[in-house]
Image (spheres, rainbow, N blue to C red):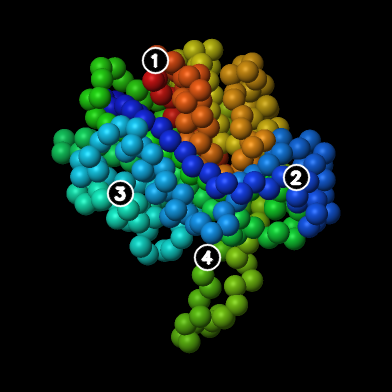
């Protein structure tokens, strides 16, 4: 695939201050810390109180601009990957544009669920093919707490809220950053993870209703586990093949934080030490499109990503979708 000379120059993330521990959940449902942590690796999750998705993405965008000292009027585009925008219209990206004063940018949201940030990287790389575009922002953000059935212990223990993003710049410095990519969707398995939208209450619809009985997230955990553990290693290897690299060449595997067990199985299938697979799921739970950029920013801020580091990014989830990107910092 054609390589475009561009760089991720800044990373940022934001999570709500309200933290819900496993013990907190045990007060409202039949569960306990041992049951949750042993099956998922999750100990806590951050959830909004008086914020929504727009607030999260604006915080990330403002942080990116503060770090980079880039004039917001020099931003050419803003893309937000989310399945839980505050409103259908205006989009989360449009709200960011207004908040930061990026009046020369075009903006849109993208929904590929848990793979959203990875799909977004592919999309924005295509946008940079235009010679007039030099700077862009990509943010993955979710507020899944508003779609969670807090009486269902099989799903309520899994999800958290948060946002993470990157500033990308063309020709920022010599060297290719994006080395290989693999995207895959399996719509025939789409019913394994669902999150209903607004029901049709038109008087002309045969199924018109003012109720919304299917608004919560539903998931077939076993099917998703099988999908991820079978397909993510193959996807990463296909992307590595494009990059003329092997798993041994990768310094860090930054995977969607859905379940610690899934990450451990993927590491084994790639024949790589688990130390190359950093995890923060214990703190944030599953934040869908936000999980990869949140983890990427934490690693970057901690100095664990060095110049020249080869990073494998992978997202997987609703759709069902998955995607892998091989990048060199």
Q: What element carries label 1?
A: loop
Report, in whole angstroms, how far the alpha carbon at label 1 lies from the one at label 4: 43 Å
| Label 4 packing within 10 angstroms: few (<14), some (14-19), many (20+) | few
Name the side, left or right, on which 67 lies relative to 209: left
Instruction: Please give the label number shown on residue 22.
Output: 2
Report, in whole angstroms, how far the alpha carbon at label 4 lies from the one at label 2: 28 Å
Foreground mark, 1 or 4, reads 1
Q: Is mark 3 on a helix, strand or loop?
A: helix
Residue 98 at x, y = what percent?
Answer: 29, 55
* Nearer to the camera, 219 or 207: 219
| Label 1 packing within 10 angstroms: few (<14), some (14-19), many (20+) | few
Q: In which quarter of the image is the N terminus?
A: top left
| Tag 1 and tag 2, C-beta contact below 8 Å | no
| Tag 2 and tag 3, C-beta contact below 8 Å | no
Sequence-wise, the earlier of marks 4 and 2 is 2
* Nearer to the camera, 306 or 302: 302
Report, in whole angstroms, how far the alpha carbon at label 3 lies from the one at label 4: 29 Å
Report, in whole angstroms, how far the alpha carbon at label 1 lies from the one at label 2: 38 Å
Seen from this angle, which residue lies furthest bottom?
203
Is residue 120 something one can see in this rendering?
no
Q: Is mark 2 on a helix, strand or loop?
A: helix
Judging by the rendered image, the residue that carries numbered circle 1 is: 307
Name the side, left or right, on which 200 lies relative to 147: left
Report, in whole angstroms, how far the alpha carbon at label 2 lies from the one at label 3: 36 Å
Q: Residue at x 47, y 26 (%)?
A: 301
Judging by the rendered image, the residue that carries numbered circle 3 is: 100
Name the side, left or right, on which 24 lies relative to 270: right
């Amino acid at each position: 695939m054609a390589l475009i000379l561009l760089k991720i120059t800044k990373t940022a993330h934001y999570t709500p201050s309200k933290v819900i521990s496993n013990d907190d959940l045990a007060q409202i449902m039949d569960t306990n810390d041992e049951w949750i942590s042993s099956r998922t690796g999750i100990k806590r999750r951050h959830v909004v109180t008086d914020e929504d998705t727009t607030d999260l993405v604006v915080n990330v965008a403002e942080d990116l601009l503060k770090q980079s000292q880039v004039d917001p009027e020099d931003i050419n585009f803003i893309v937000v990957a989310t399945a839980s925008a505050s409103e259908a219209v205006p989009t989360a990206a449009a709200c960011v544009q207004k908040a930061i004063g990026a009046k020369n940018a075009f903006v849109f949201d993208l929904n590929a669920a848990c793979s959203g940030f990875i799909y977004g990287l592919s999309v924005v790389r295509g946008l940079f093919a235009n010679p007039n575009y030099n700077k862009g922002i990509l943010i993955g953000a979710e507020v899944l707490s508003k779609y969670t059935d807090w009486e269902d212990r099989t799903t309520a223990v899994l999800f958290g809220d948060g946002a993470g993003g990157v500033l990308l710049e063309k020709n920022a410095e010599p060297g290719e950053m994006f080395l290989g990519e693999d995207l895959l969707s399996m719509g025939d398995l789409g019913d394994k993870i669902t999150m209903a939208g607004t029901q049709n209450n038109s008087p002309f619809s045969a199924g018109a209703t003012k109720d919304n009985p299917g608004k919560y997230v539903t998931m077939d955990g076993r099917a998703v586990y099988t999908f991820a553990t079978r397909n993510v290693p193959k996807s990463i290897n296909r992307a590595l093949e494009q990059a003329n690299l092997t798993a041994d060449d990768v310094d860090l595997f930054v995977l969607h934080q859905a379940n610690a067990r899934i990450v451990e199985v993927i590491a084994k299938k790639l024949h790589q030490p688990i130390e190359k697979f950093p995890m923060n799921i214990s703190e944030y739970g599953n934040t869908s499109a936000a999980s990869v950029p949140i983890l990427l920013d934490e690693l970057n801020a901690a100095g664990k990503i060095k110049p020249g580091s080869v990073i494998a990014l992978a997202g997987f989830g609703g759709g069902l979708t998955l995607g892998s990107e091989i990048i060199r910092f």
